[in-house]
Amino acid sequence: MKTYASIPHPTMTRLISGLRFRWIKSQSGFSLLEIIVGIVIIGIAFVGAMYALTEIQNRSSRIEIMLKATTMANDIMEIVRSNNFDEYNSSPWSNPLGPEENSPSQYDDVDDYIGYLWSFPGFTGYQGSTRVYYVNPNVSWIDSANSVTNYKYIRVQVTHDGLDVPIVLTSLITPRVSAAEESGGLGPPPPPP
Ligand SMILES: [Ca+2]
C-alpha cells in the first residue's frame, strides 16, 4: 500500500534530478588549466596580502620611532631651556658662545649645550644634538645674527635610521626681563615668523 509520503512530487523529482546532474558534473573534476589559473590567482592574492601586511608593519614602526624621537627632542629642549640665558646674569652676554664648565653635569646656561650629543640608554639608534646661537628676529628668526643680541635660538635634532627626516624642535629664549632692561631692553617686538 502506497502512503502519501511515498508518492514522488513533480517538483521534488525535478530538484533531485538537478542535484544529481550537478553532482555528476562535479565528479568530472577541474581541468589542469583551471587548477593553474586558480593557483595563480591565489598566489597573487597571497603576495598582495603579505605586501599590505608588511607595509602596515613598516608604517607602524616608523610612527612609533617618530613619536619616541619627538618625545626625546622635547625632553632635551626642556632640559636646555631650564638653564640660564647666559653664563653672565647681565649684559654683555657671552661671546663666543659655548660651555665654560668641564662637565655636562655642571652646565648652567643654554649655550653650554652647543654641539652636545645626546644618547638615550635603552633606546638604541636614537641620537640627539643641540645648536645654540644668537639671532636678530628683526632680520631673521632662524639665521645666526653673527653678533651678540638678546635672543638665543635653540635647535634640537633627534635622528634615527627609521626616520625619513630628523625630528627638529626650535625655541627662542630671551634673558629675564630685569636683565634685559639692564642691557637696554629687548628692542622692538619682532615680526611674526
Ligand atoms: Ca655655563
Image (cartoon, rainbow, N blue to C red):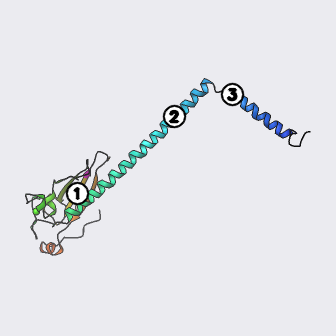
The amino acid sitting under disc 3 is Gln
Q: CA distance from mark 1 to mark 2?
A: 48 Å
Element assignment for label 1: strand
Q: Total label count?
A: 3
Nearer to us: label 1 or label 2: 2
Q: Which mark is residue 65?
A: none
Q: Position of residue 34 (x, y in %)?
A: 61, 27
Element assignment for label 2: helix
Horizontal side of residue 184 vs 120, given as left or right: left
Residue that numbered label 1 is attached to: 155
Task: Please tell me which residue is depicted at 79% across the width and 36% down the height of the picture.
Answer: 16
Residue that numbered label 3 is attached to: 27
Q: Does residue 26 sit above or below 126 in this rendering?
A: above
Residue that numbered label 2 is attached to: 44
Q: Position of residue 187 (x, y in %)?
A: 19, 70
Q: Quadrant of ligand 1?
A: bottom left
Horizontal side of residue 112 vs 166, given as left or right: left
- What predominant SS class does the magenta segment belong to? loop
Q: Position of residue 29 (x, y in %)?
A: 65, 27
